[in-house]
Amino acid sequence: MECTIDWGGPNGMLFTASTGSGHVAVMDGAVDGGGHNLAPRPMEMLLAGTGGCTAYDVVLILKRGRHAVTGCSVKLQADRADADPKVFTRIHFAFTVTGRNLPRAAVERAVQLSHEKYCSASAMLEKTAAMTFSVDIVDTQEATAAA
């Protein structure tokens, strides 16, 4: 895996990441740090990548288990250390998984497997951050019946 980061020049703190898979992401800094607030901060990208990694796992695990998953979102809330390096010290993952007749045990197991076995990003961040999880399941069958 590789990634190249290019600085946008002397009038700001805009950086463009070009990935080995051929994609591009942009990052910027806050105005008080010399940036122009045009894109997510690098640490926000790290948090977003962790959310994407674990959501990917959860969906894949549920699909492989032949569960009728139709949606998955995860909201991450994190605290960082006050002193440099300002590592993440706490991250809460709030999952909302949507589907038909999804067993709570299967969804919770998918979240647990992602955290304990598959998500490389959270495995790295766990070295500095206490991690907690919550799961909300939305049954699309019940939502359809109520409408």
Image (tube, helix red, strand yellow):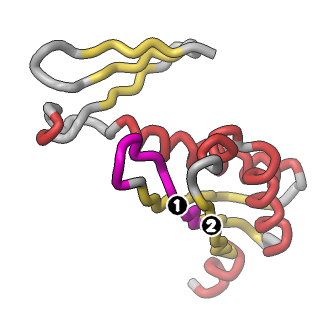
The boundaries of the magenta stretch are: 82-94
First of labels 1, 2 by sequence position:
1
Note whether 54 is above or below 75 in the view shown.
Answer: above
Q: Are marks 1 and 2 in contact (CB under 8 Å)?
A: yes
Provide the secondary structure element on which disc 1 rests.
strand
Q: Quadrant of residue 11?
A: top left
What residue do we see at 56% from left, 59% from top? 74
Query: In the image, what residue type sits under mark 1?
Result: Arg
Quarter of the figure with the C terminus: bottom right
Quadrant in which the N terminus appears:
top right
Residue 120: quadrant of the picture: top right
Residue at 52% x, 60% y is: 90
Q: In the picture provided, is 82 more to the left or to the right than 105?
A: left
The residue indicated by pointer 2 is 132
Horizontally, is 104 left or right of 145 in the view?
A: right
> Label 2 sits on what residue type?
Thr
Packing grade of label 2 (10 A; few <14, some 14-19, many >=20) is few
**How far apart in space, not on screen, are marks 1 and 2 (Cα)?**
8 Å
- Residue 13, image x and y in percent? 21, 26
Residue visible at 27% across and 15% down?
Answer: 7
Q: Which mark is residue 123?
A: none
Which of the 4 image quadrants contains residue 69?
bottom right
Magenta-colored stretch includes residue 92: yes
Figure disc tally: 2
The x, y position of residue 108, in whole percent, is 78, 67
**Towards the viewer: 86 or 93:** 86
Disc number lying in front (1 or 2): 1
Residue indicated by mark 1: 90
